[in-house]
Image (cartoon, grey):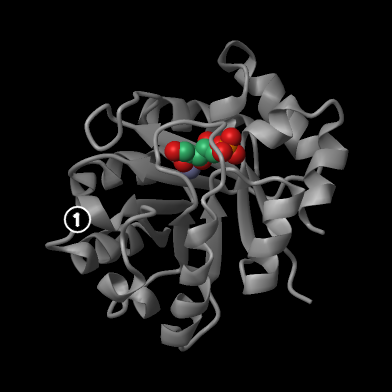
Amino acid sequence: MTKIIIAPSILSSDFANLELEIKKIEENGADWVHVDVMDGHFVPNITIGAPVVKSIRKITSLPLDVHLMIDNPEKFIKDFALAGADIITFHYEAAKDNPEKIINLIKSYGKKAGISIKPNTKVNEIKDIVNKVDLILIMTVEPGFGGQAFMFDCLDKINEIKKYLTKNIYIETDGGINPDTAKLCINMGVNALVAGNYIFTHKNMKEAINSLRI
Ligand code: DX5
Ligand code: ZN
């Protein structure tokens, strides 16, 4: 069985104690750190940028899984790559004209490239590029905020993506992940899970992380 990657989203962490929060997820068995970057345009919320990624890079050896929920992602790939991101995922909806160019740009910095789709975007729109990325991130909530309810109708997309894939890559879901929804995703073939609210509000983080791997 493939190992399920657990990527806690620091959006739900205490930003005043970010170093402690990241050490905590590291000690409790997380595989990646998921960093949600929002610009107030692509999504109705503003979070953090490349300088914060640079600071986080210094205090953890875990891979940094950077999720760009921003317009014009091509303008910022360099900043996040140099800041120390390991995986850079952009939204297809923000780059419909030139997704391949952005994928190549991310790879030119030696980083893993991911593409994400929002709940209303159909998989067939990205069918020609799924084999060019290292990760596909299927949003299971409308991007913008942590703590929302999982959208079950996004699950069918996983099967569809598998139909187009000719190799093994990361298939990640993000939004409303808890042990019940994690199980549904894993059974469909997801191998990387992002969870914010569930992990950071649980009284025992180790238990929370382990419970998502089934
Ligand atoms: C939402 C973000 C998610 C979010 C997940 O736009 O991309 O990563 O933090 O949070 P939960 O697990 O609380 O839904
Ligand atoms: Zn995210």
**Residue 168 at x, y = what percent?**
55, 80
Name the quarter where the C terminus is drawn.
Answer: bottom right
Q: Is residue 9 visible?
A: no
Q: What is the x, y in percent for residue 45?
A: 34, 25
Above or below for 190 versus 45: below
**Frontmost residue, 189 versus 89:** 189
Instruction: Name the residue located 19 percent from the left edge and 65 percent from the top edge.
Output: 101
Q: How many marks?
A: 1
Q: Is residue 101 left or right of residue 20?
A: left
Q: Please give the residue where the numbered disc 1 appears in the rendered image.
A: 95
The quarter of the image holding the N terminus is bottom right
Judge: label 1 CB < 8 Å from ligand 2.
Answer: no
Q: Residue at x 50, y 70 (%)?
A: 156
Q: Residue at coordinates 46% horizontally, 31% vertically from top-left?
A: 145
Q: What secondary structure is marked by label 1?
A: loop
Residue 101 in view (yes/no) = yes
Task: Please tell me whether residue 11 is drawn above or below residue 110 in the rendered image.
Answer: above
| Residue type beneath disc 1 | Ala
Residue, far left: 97
132 w.r.t. 53: above or below: below
Q: Position of residue 133 (x, y in %)?
A: 39, 70
